[in-house]
């Protein structure tokens, strides 16, 4: 009865499903250093095959013919065949894998997990080079970002800026001769939130865009559920235009205003709302949080700049992130005039998405950077943070490059739905080791493996694993 049912099923396939019959020889070649090891391997292989109802037959006294048949010589010297239909045969052929290998300024992103071929890609060739690096803690997000930063620094002429909320990029940046800007109440590094250049906006008057940034800054400072009132916005806009008059006439660094100039101008206004704004601003000008009331005194024109904001307290971290984003925007606008790209890395990006002002500015970066030659890259743990609102979801939708490492279970389901990932592809980001996952490059999806050699100076600079750091200390 069993054979009869199988024969009937085969007949239906051939008659109704456009199937054909093929005579197939399947050879599994085993090699080992000793005869005993070879026997053990054969038994294991037979056991695995038996588990799936397949029978493997050892080709005793036919080893030479089997070897010649296994080699790509298109000669089959083994007369053992079985019948397979088209769909069953298609499992074995063709052996095709999707590859990503570009020339020019292409960067290395690991090995193709299926073919072991190099993955070389140039994000500038994408319609939208914006990128995301997603993964659970310990999956290798920061290491992957440092990997790309190093390759971009050595292989391209692009400028690179980094927002570092965990103070973990400074060894690499210092080793590459970059500038680490340590922003904290105890630091003597200062960046001026009022910095501007004449290319700051597409409009003839860059003050319009700068005024919008200062409104966001004041909104963070003043706080409140309702934000700034229309009268307060008008006062801020008026004061901004007044304090930049000297600089717009003669754009030299000594004419660049600082936050204290805005505070003094508000004090001169007659409206009570202006006095309220000035009072709210006072702690950031004359008080204990006055770190942003200085002219820039660090080399922010270095090719590689890292903004270390780890020691900023809760009150200053949000403002610090907004100021850094504005500094990077200024750098991008300057480089555009030079036809130069600017890469911008934001680690722990979910911190920016928590506040309305910083998240709105981040969304704006993802929308506008491309045509200005900017290449932003965000690192975050949970994709849920990127789908918290319709506006923030634009970051996810406007990223044609996604470097996806191991994912939490809840995030896997969301990503499978958002990116149309098959269950098989999803297995490459399920309980995987550090440095393994999927790369999304436009419409190309490739599983990758990137195991960096640990016996190198570069690895010792980039790693944040405690066991690796402890081992380095022991060697020292």
Image: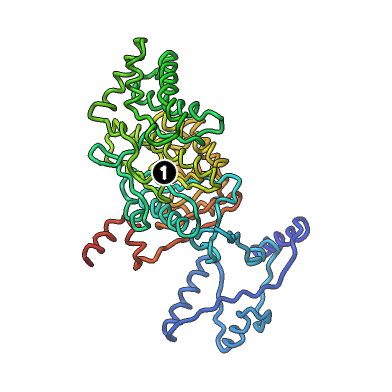
Q: Is residue 10 left or right of residue 334?
A: right
**Colouring rule applied to residues:** rainbow
For the C terminus, the quadrant is bottom left
Viewer-nearest residue: 372 or 468: 372
Please state the total of marks drawn on the protein image. Answer: 1
* Residue placed furthest toward the top: 271
Residue displayed at 45% across by 56% down: 153
Can you tell which quarter of the image residue 214 is in?
top left
Residue 9: give x, y in percent of width and height.
70, 59
Q: Is residue 417 visible?
A: no
Residue displayed at 42% across by 27% down: 246
In this rendering, is residue 310 above or below 63?
above
In this rendering, is residue 144 above or below 89?
above
Crowding at dot 1, Cα within 10 Å, few <14 / some 14-19 / many 20+, comes out as many
Viewer-nearest residue: 93 or 104: 104
Residue 86: give x, y in percent of width and height.
70, 63
Q: Is residue 375 visible?
A: yes
Q: Secondary structure at mark 1?
A: strand
Can you tell which quarter of the image residue 470 is in?
bottom left
For the N terminus, the quadrant is bottom right
Q: Is residue 382 left or right of residue 3?
A: left
Residue 111: give x, y in percent of width and height.
50, 63
* Residue placed furthest toward the right: 15
Residue 323: give x, y in percent of width and height.
38, 35
Viewer-nearest residue: 254 or 81: 254
Q: Which residue is mark 1?
A: 346
């Amino acid at each position: 009865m069993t054979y009869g049912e199988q024969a009937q099923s085969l007949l239906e396939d051939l008659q109704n499903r456009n199937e054909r019959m093929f005579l197939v020889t399947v050879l599994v070649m085993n090699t080992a250093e000793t005869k005993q090891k070879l026997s053990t391997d054969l038994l294991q292989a037979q056991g695995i095959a038996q588990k799936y109802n397949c029978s493997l037959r050892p080709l005793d006294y036919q080893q030479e013919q089997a070897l010649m048949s296994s080699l790509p010589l298109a000669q089959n010297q083994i007369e053992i065949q079985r019948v397979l239909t088209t769909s069953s045969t298609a499992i074995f052929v063709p052996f095709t894998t999707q590859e990503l290998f570009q020339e020019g300024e292409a960067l290395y992103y690991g090995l193709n997990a299926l073919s072991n071929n190099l993955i070389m890609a140039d994000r500038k060739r994408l319609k939208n080079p914006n990128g995301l690096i997603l993964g659970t803690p310990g999956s290798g997000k920061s290491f992957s970002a440092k990997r790309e930063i190093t390759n971009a620094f050595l292989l391209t002429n692009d400028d690179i800026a980094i927002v570092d909320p965990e103070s973990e990029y400074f060894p690499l940046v210092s080793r590459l001769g970059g500038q680490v800007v340590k922003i904290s109440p105890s630091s003597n590094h200062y960046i001026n939130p009022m910095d501007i250049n004449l290319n700051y906006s597409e409009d003839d008057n860059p003050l319009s865009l700068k005024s919008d940034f200062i409104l966001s800054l004041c909104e963070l400072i003043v706080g409140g559920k309702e934000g700034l009132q229309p009268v307060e916005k008008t006062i801020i806009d008026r004061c901004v235009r007044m304090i930049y008059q000297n600089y717009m006439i003669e754009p030299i660094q000594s004419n660049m205003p600082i936050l204290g100039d805005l505070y003094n101008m508000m004090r001169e206004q007659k409206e009570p709302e202006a006095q309220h704004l000035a009072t709210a601003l006072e702690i950031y000008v004359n008080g204990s949080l006055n770190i942003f009331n200085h002219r820039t005194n660090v080399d922010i024109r270095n090719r590689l700049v890292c903004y270390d904001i780890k020691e900023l307290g809760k009150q200053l971290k949000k403002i610090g992130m907004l100021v850094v984003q504005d500094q990077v925007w200024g750098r991008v606008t300057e480089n555009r005039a030079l036809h130069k790209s600017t890469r911008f890395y934001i680690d722990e990006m979910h911190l920016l998405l928590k506040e309305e002002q910083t998240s709105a500015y981040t969304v704006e970066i993802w929308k506008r950077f491309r045509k200005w030659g900017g290449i932003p890259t965000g690192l975050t743990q949970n994709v849920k943070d990127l789908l918290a609102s319709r506006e923030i979801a634009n970051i996810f939708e406007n990223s044609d490059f996604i470097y996806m490492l191991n994912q939490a279970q809840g995030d896997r389901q969301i990503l499978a739905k958002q990116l149309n990932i098959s269950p098989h592809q999803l297995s490459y980001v399920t309980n995987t080791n550090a440095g393994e996952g999927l790369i999304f490059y436009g419409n190309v999806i490739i599983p990758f493996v990137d195991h960096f050699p640990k016996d190198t100076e570069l690895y010792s600079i980039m790693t944040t694993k405690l066991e690796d750091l402890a081992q380095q200390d022991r060697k020292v």
